[in-house]
Amino acid sequence: MKILYINELLNSSSGSSIHGRKLTEKLKLLDVSLLTIPAINNEKSIKFRSNFIKTFMLNMPSAISEIIRFIKQNLKSFFSLLEIHFVIKSFKPDCILIRTELYDLKPILLKKISKIPIVLEVNAPFFLEKKIHYEARNKNLIIPSFLSKLDLKIWKSADAIYVVSNILKKIVKSQLGNESPFIEVIPNGVDSDYLDKLPTEFSNGKSSDIRIGFAGSLQFWHGCELLLEAYEEIAKLRPATKLIFIGDGENRKNLEHYVYYNKNLKERVIFTGKLTYANTMEILKKMDILVAPYKVSKYFYFSSLKIFDYMASGKAIIASKLGQINEILEHDVDAILINPENKEEFCNALLTLIDSGEKRFKLGNMAFHKAKNYTWGKSAKSLLDLVQKIVTEKMYCA
């Protein structure tokens, strides 16, 4: 099987890069001849990019900024299509996988100029995601109707779609209606290599220096403000604890500002900045409690990478009771699940775990063993099965 995988974010600093890299890595182990556009760079060479342009665009009227994004994206896509055209002629793939991007017409154009089956990787309904981004900044999203309908037109161009969560599948199917292509749910996962390296037993003794960790891109919907507010209370009651933010993102400056002007937090909160995936996993294993206090969202369609990484670390997890998190983790069995944005529940959960090494051990151990059900190898196998099904059907219909 020869697969061409097109993913603009393969060399980005986002979680989408990890998703794409791990899937391609595991697909190659399944005897797949795979070519990526762009070619994959060494992860250590990837740097976090400034959000200056993104911030500037958000301060413009939304209709203007979104039209500029549309033009910019498709100018880039035009030059990318030239490269793709020559790659298709020389590589002759059996299938093209494309990670969809906001306003990107590549899937529609490739459908017109190529007879090769197209499978779309849809990690977000972009129009809805844009709305969430704007609402997080108390802004309204008003854009021309043709842009708001592009998601639908792009999805319709596919022979099949794979999404990361059941909720996202429902959203996509509800938009497509009877015209829906085949849709498969393939969630994110963990690298089995990390599961093999982790010990099978965990220390359950009490610690005088509990480390609470958060890993992620520090976005506005991650609930990091609530985390700091809750930890402000915890630091007074359990002063030997520390809070570590692993990662970088557009909300980091606001969080650092909050810490800087709070004497009780200054010596207890650490920002590591952007780390490689391997270094992130090493630090997660050194934490005692890992948190994911996502904000309330009507459509929580994410398949959160951090949840799978937390599970693989074998540490106790506190997370918001939302979407796929609530489907994978079970309250008081392998995590403590809290109502989102509930500071009192969050504080109580933190205190419970800080004071009980036995509870931390039990939850972390259960989560670690459950993580074995969610590996990138299994995700890659599901994806390959989907591709083979679509390629076979296309051959019979030809």
Image (cartoon, rainbow, N blue to C red):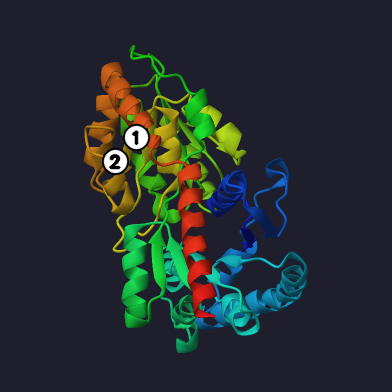
Answer whether labels 2 and 1 touch (C-beta < 8 Å): yes
> In this rendering, does residue 352 appear at all?
yes
Q: Mark number for residue 370? A: 1
Residue 189: x and y, percent? 45, 44
* Residue 8 drawn above or below residue 378: below
* Residue 173 drawn above or below residue 178: above
Residue 376: x and y, percent? 50, 44
Q: Mark number for residue 346? A: none
* Of 225 and 164, the residue lying toward us: 164
Residue beneath the point at 61% across and 79% down: 115
Give the labeled residue for mark 2: 329
Instruction: Tell which residue pokes out farthest to the front in this image.
Output: 396
> In this rendering, does residue 158 appear at all?
no
Residue beneath the point at 55% across and 28% down: 282
* Of 253 and 387, the residue lying toward us: 387
* Of 161 and 281, the residue lying toward us: 161
Quadrant housing the N terminus: bottom right
Please identify, in this view, whether the residue under mark 2 or under mark 1 is nearer the observer: 1
The amino acid marked with disc number 2 is: Leu
The quarter holding residue 350 reads top left
User: Dot 2: within a 10 Å radius of its alpha carbon, few (fewer than 14), some, or many (20 or more) residues?
Assistant: many
Residue beneath the point at 60% across and 50% down: 24
On the picture, is 303 further left or further right than 384? left
Residue 82: x and y, percent? 76, 76
Quadrant housing the C terminus: bottom right
On the picture, is 272 further left or further right than 92? left
Under circle 1, the secondary element is helix
